[in-house]
Image: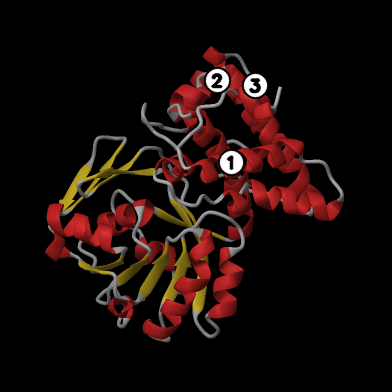
Amino acid sequence: MNKDRPIGIAGAGSIGCFVGGMLAASGRRVALLARPRVVEEITANGLRVTSFDGSEQRLQADHLTLSDDPSIFRDAAAVLVTVKSADTREMADLIARHAPPDVVVVSLQNGVGNVPLLRELLPGRRVLGGMVPFNVVALGDGRFHRSTSGDIVIARDDEGAAAMLSVPGLAMRATDNIDGVQWGKLIVNLNNALNALSNIPLRRQLAQRNWRRLFADQMAEGLAVIRAEGIVPVSPTPLPSSWMPPLLRLPDTVFELLLGRTMKIDPEARSSMWEDLQRGRRTEIDYLQGVITEIAERRGLAAPLSRRIVQLVRQAEAAGRGSPGLTPEQIRGA
């Protein structure tokens, strides 16, 4: 990967703007493909990326190539795909038409089906899977805030893409099992919907045992379903996926000690699905709980909690009033 050529961000929303900002702050050439609203916001305010650890980077708009025109990818060495899963097909078409044949395409998306789809639609191009473990919140005026900890993980390749994309403050690690890592992230991401439905900050949600028990039951259901498919998930946290349900059910004080040692979370951090509901956007529920229910149906398994959560999120999407602020009991249908 030629470091003199730009890195394209395909879909510069919250994650894309944070990752692009960190890369640009370290001297990399960055081309952000964004919606006109985001282009206007950054043009007017510059790009400000902040983190839970107190770090901050500010960039003037002219330090970036910023446009809603995909031709900005014409000489990209790499394109990092950060769009919602439902938009993968459309973005693949733009990359096929505007990026050079030798571009490295890295999916930094939620879900487990994006890499196969990108490979199908981009034959002959090198496509790598990736996993972003942290949340980013768009705070307005060009500010994008990382609210939880963790390093990006990218599939290992012969050219060392992970190492070449890694910069200070934004570590990217290579893995030989990106499929397992993505399934592990999907299991953890099942809490995205719970947090979105709760309308309370993530840390306060996890501090309450009733919410953790609900999350534990959701994880246990998801793990049982994907293991029936022969999938072995790799946890994005230092703790194995199989340990998480019983740990989540521990008393509050014990769990708080464990959480503090494994993950840093801002007091006001929320899930990306919560932000989608608040902004009236389509969520990725079909690519999270929806994946669990699809496998369960195909294998004749029960996944009542996943089905219930899919239903509640779709109702919230249709209502268009943001998070419904449900309790754990309401989510369970008790």
Q: Within the image, what quadrant is residue 29 found in?
A: bottom left
Q: Which amino acid does label 1 sit on?
A: Gln
Observer able to see residue 155: no
- In the rendered image, residue 189, in percent from the top left (x then y), is placed at 56, 43
Give the mark, 3 or 2, whose residue is nearer the N terminus: 2
Residue carrying label 1 = 315
Q: Characterize the local packing of mark 2: few (<14), some (14-19) or many (20 or more) Cα atoms within 10 angstroms.
A: some
Task: Locate residue 136 relative to residue 129 in the image: left or right.
Answer: left
Query: Which dot marks residue 255?
Result: 2
Q: Which amino acid does label 2 sit on?
A: Phe
Q: Say above or below: 152 vs 165.
A: above
Q: Nearer the viewer, mark 2 or mark 1?
A: 1
Give the mark, 3 or 1, whose residue is nearer the N terminus: 1
Residue carrying label 3 = 329
Q: Characterize the local packing of mark 3: few (<14), some (14-19) or many (20 or more) Cα atoms within 10 angstroms.
A: few
Give the mark, 2 or 1, whose residue is nearer the N terminus: 2
